Image: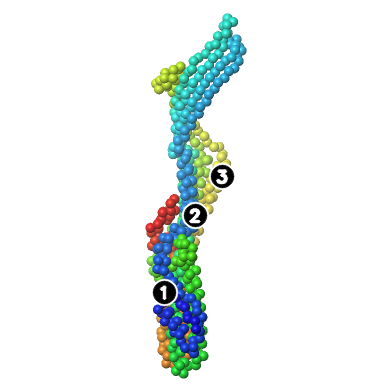
Amino acid sequence: MKRCSLKSKTHAAVCALALAHVCFLPSVVFAALPEVETGIEVPEHSRLSRAEFVSLVAHNLPEIARGRITVRRAESESAQTLAIFDPQLAVTYETLASRARVENELSSGIAERYSHSLNASIGRLFASGGTLTASFNQSLTRSKTPYEIFGETIEQGVPWNYGPQLTIAFEQPLLEGRGRRVTMLAHSAALRRAEAERVAVEQQISAALLNALSVWLEVRFAEEEHLLRERSLARTTAQLEAAGALVEGGRIASYELELFRERVAAGLQELVASRVRVQALSRTLADLVGAAPGEQRFGSGAITIPPDELDGAAVCAAAAARSPEVLAARAQLVLAETAVDAASDSAKATLDVWGSFSTGGLDENVGAALAQMATFESIAVMAGLRFSAPIRNRAALESVKQAAVDVDRARLEVALAERAACFAAMDTHEELGAHRDRYSLAAYRTGAVERVLDAEEERFARGLSTVQQTLDALERVEAAELSALRVRLDGELAFRRMQHLTGTLLSESGAAVDMSALLSADGTGAP
């Protein structure tokens, strides 16, 4: 007959012994068993602790990559708003050559004029809203005009004249509204938009990390479930051997062995199904950490229900203060308040002071002309005040009202987010406490059914119990163990949800990963 196949590295000895009882009993005890693959090969290097998994998955989540791009774009837009403070340099050159006929009492003929002009200026805006500009102009001019004297035409003109001029001008707003503050409003708004984008990305990352940790826990659960079913199959095959001995002793009918045979076949079916689940989940886990296609990754460490360190009120307060959803709502509130500042400034008056100082020269010799400019032989000083105030600026006033409405809406969203986070955290906290109670009861139940199984096995060996009673006891033990395992999984999943709600999922994961570093330009958040 065909040999059974059960390849499990972890419980190889137990399973080999169990299936040896099944596969090598005399034909009167057990008929041929189809060959099936139920074992799981787990290379040691493919196991990941929770902290290792979080460190790896944090660098491979698509949400991280998308978030890094979003944050980089927002930060670039913020830096771009500072371009208004960059010095501006302007240089222009102009030339003129003209010939025109003139006819009047004093002149008759062709008048000529030539000029070259070079203008250079540099200026910049300051955070106070003031501007400072320095400009230099160098002109070179020459003209010739025909004059008629006593019937004789004489061309009179001037040689090339050099006319340098240096001017320094400034303008400074004196009022904060529509003046000094408005200069930085665009940058402040861009900074707040960037922060809002970062908080929204962190919210998405925390949710994605929670889902990834759920997969890690599902893999651990599937592995432990597989081992549990292997132990259950080993117990069943041990009872099958004991039943075979009773058949040979004539103490039970051989047809009763069919109940054990059916139970062993069902156990092998469950093992095959659990092996497929483990392998599928392990490939999902490998994809989350960026492993090559076809590779598998498994978890390490037991599934546990961590101790409760906070009461319901403290959990509520923590969620209302640090929940990713609450932080995102608060970032939108700050952004809305920035819009109020911008809208209110457009409805305010302005009062600016301005002034300029010029010095220049004019001479046929360029050196002499520059000397005149440097010694302030020819100067001009101007100064003044400029006042502007809107009169019934209804457009600006309505903009202020609309911005205030947006702030009220954002405040409402913050309050609703805080309330929702508090209720969700308290529900999860109570759920976590219920899972701890359930696990205590599940452990008690498991101990009770194991004692019942020990008693049934002893009674069955003495011929005082039936095959069905023994099988029922075996199934109760397996069901109790599976229930305890499921309660542990539910408990740890609830604990991770509470960490997400209180904003501590990443910081308390044990992984040396910093969110700010993950979202930096190069994404260096590795431990």
The amino acid on which the numbered mark 1 sits, given as a three-letter code, is: Lys
Which residue is the site of mark 1?
Answer: 9
Q: Secondary structure at mark 3?
A: helix
Q: Horizontal placement of 244 versus 399: left or right?
A: left
Q: Which mark is residue 398?
A: 3
Which numbered disc flags the more N-terminal residue, 3 or 2? Answer: 2
> Which residue shows up at 51% across the image and 53% down it?
410
**Residue 229 at x, y percent in the picture:** 46, 78
**Residue 392 at x, y percent in the picture:** 56, 39
**Residue 212 at x, y percent in the picture:** 47, 63
Q: Within 10 angstroms of label 2, few (less than 14), some, or many (20 or more) residues?
A: some
Position above or below: 406 against 312: above
Position above or below: 521 against 101: below
Q: Secondary structure at mark 1?
A: loop
The residues tagged by marks 3 and 2 sit, at their Cα atoms, a distance apart of: 37 Å
The residues tagged by marks 2 and 1 sit, at their Cα atoms, a distance apart of: 40 Å
> Which residue shows up at 49% across the image and 81% down it?
2
Number of labelled discs? 3
Q: Quadrant of the C terminus?
A: bottom left
Which residue is the site of mark 2?
Answer: 66
Position above or below: 265 against 54: below
The amino acid on which the numbered mark 3 sits, given as a three-letter code, is: Glu
> Which residue shows up at 47% across the image and 88% down it?
26
Q: Which mark is residue 171?
A: none
